[in-house]
Image (spheres, rainbow, N blue to C red):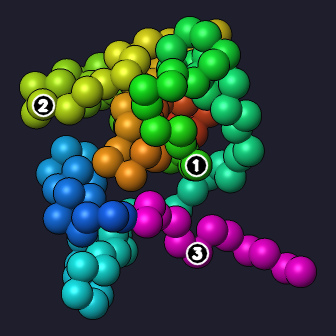
Amino acid sequence: MDIRFIAGFGPITRSGEAGLAFWASALGLRFDEMAPDHHHAHELPGANVFGLWPLAQAAAATFGVEEWPADRPVPQAWVEFEMVSPEAVEAGAVELVEGGHEVLRGAHQEPWGQWVARLQSPEGLLVGLSYLRDFHPEAAIR
C-alpha cells in the first residue's frame, strides 16, 4: 500500500444545516456545495499530522481528568486548525464564545509548547484551534 496523503476528512452530519452553520459560520470555513447538503472546503490545505489519540488523553487535555464526561458525546475523531499565532488562538476562542459556542477549554499552552483551545462540533468531533511553533519555520527567526 502506498498512501501519499489524507485526501479528505470531515464529519458525518446528522443535520446539514446545523453542521454547515457550525463549520462555516463559527469557524469561518468557505464551502462549495457539491451536491444537495454535501459541502467541500476545497481551499483548506491538508493535515500535517494523522494521529491516534486515546480518549483518556483527549479527556485529560480537554477537561483535566482521564474520563470523558458522561453528559458529552464521546468524540470519534479530532481535528485541529492551525492558527497564525498564539494570540490568534486566544482571539479565536473569544470569538467562538461571543458567537454563542461552548468552548470546552480556553486558549492555553500545553507542556510541549502548543497553544490550543478546544470545543466540540454538533457531530461530537473534538475541534481545536491550535498554534504549534514547529509548523511555522518563520517563527524560529524571531
- Please provide the residue range marked out in magenta: 1-12
Query: As shown in the figure, which amino acid type bears the numbered disc 3?
Result: Ala
First in sequence: mark 2 or mark 1?
1
Q: Which residue does the numbered mark 1 point to in the structure image? A: 76
Instruction: Tell me where residue 24 sits by quadrant.
Output: bottom left
Q: CA distance from mark 2 to mark 1?
A: 24 Å
Sequence order check: which comes first, mark 3 or mark 1?
Answer: 3
Position of 134 with respect to 15 (left or right) is: right
- Would you name the residue on which mark 3 appears? 7
Q: Position of residue 87 (x, y in %)?
A: 31, 20
Q: Position of residue 93 (x, y in %)?
A: 27, 25
The outermost residue toward the bottom is: 35
Q: Which residue is mark 2?
A: 100
- What distance separates the C-alpha of mark 2 from that of mark 3? 32 Å
Disc 2 marks a residue whose amino acid type is Gly
The number of numbered badges drawn on the structure is 3
Q: Residue at x 63, y 19 (%)?
A: 67
